[in-house]
Amino acid sequence: MSARNVPGVSVATVEDGALAWADAYGVRAVDGEPTTVDTVFEAASISKPVFAWWVLGLCERGVLDLDAPLSRYTTDRVVLDHGADVITARMVLSHTSALSWEFTGRGDEGRLSLSGTPGAVFRYSNAGFECLRALVRQLTGQPTRDELHRFMSELAMTRSSYAWDASFEDDYASPHDLEGNVCEKEKSGRLKYVSAELHSTAPDLAAFLCELVRPDQPPTHAEALKPHVDVHQGFLKGAPGPGAHWGLGIGVWLVDGRTTVWHWGENPGFQSILIAWPDERRGIVVLTNSDHGHWVSRAAVQAFAGLDHPAFRWIEN
């Protein structure tokens, strides 16, 4: 942590499908209060597998068909005008929707576009998740943030929220840059991007991991943990190595004969990792408040799993 200017880290592990251990190190902000296991971090793109798991529950209940064109369910012209006649929820969750943001200038939040043929190749897509969020908002008739909070409460994720929550004021991590300088923490209570705005703790995300590694998964959720697309073709960051695939909302990687499911997170000033071995019912979560956090996460995962996981070579690219 000292060598890489990482002020704070929170870690939790799962063994035999239950929380086994959690601890925290360092400080929430430079020259600030100590980090605790209750310290809330930005989980960044770990938002995606949690959101995906909730959507798969809607599919399990028949609210949404995983393989039906999105046009069956939505009147949103933004979605309809960009391939909703062929794009499905399965494509969105496996990052094969080809939906992307096209940026036209400084300060532009982007407009939706297609970067290729839907269903053809893996292209990591925040835009696809935002379109799916708009669709399920229409299906449920309820604010997505409220629905996700109910879902997380069922998993005993009691200190988690999509977007900022005032209850976090007592114990939250501030972001830090590569030099270890504290940066301003955004505290907007409005959920703007479901793909990146989950705030959570290591024990809460370990509770989600416990759900991921349950041996008695419903059929739709079990489908999520299977390889759906090889990420080499259409990969944007460089070849990640053999065995790398994507499931539904989460990466699926065969490493040394062991199936791994995983996702990383990166927001300015925060880096995180979530990795699990479903067949072994074990996993680890590492949250950091630093743009150098993956250096610490990599060491923690290596100590826990006994291997230098290739996911970190992907992240570094």
Image (cartoon, helix red, strand yellow):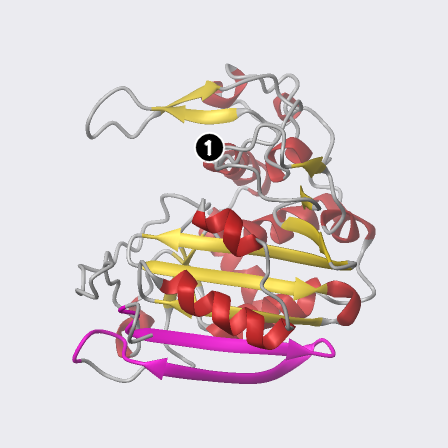
| Majority SS type along the magenta span | strand
> Does 19 sit left or right of 317 as displayed?
right
* Count of marks, rendered view: 1
What residue do we see at 50% from left, 19% from top? 115
Compared with residue 39, is residue 68 higher up or lower down, i.e. above or below? above
Magenta stretch: residue 260 in it? Answer: no
Counting other residues with Cα less than 10 Å from the Cα at mark 1, is it few (<14), some (14-19), or many (20 or more)? many
Q: Nearer the viewer, residue 202 or 145?
A: 202
Residue at (58% x, 64% y) in the render: 308
Quadrant, the C terminus: top left
Direction from residue 214 to residue 148 in the image, left or right: left
- Where does the magenta region start and end? 5-31
Question: Residue 199, can we see it?
Answer: no
User: Which residue lies under the disc numbered 1?
Assistant: 127
| Position in image of residue 207 (x %, y %) | 60, 72
Residue 232 % position (x, y): 62, 34
Residue 234, located in which quarter of the rendered image? Answer: top right
Horizontal side of 313 relative to 89 (left or right) equals left
Q: Secondary structure at mark 1?
A: helix
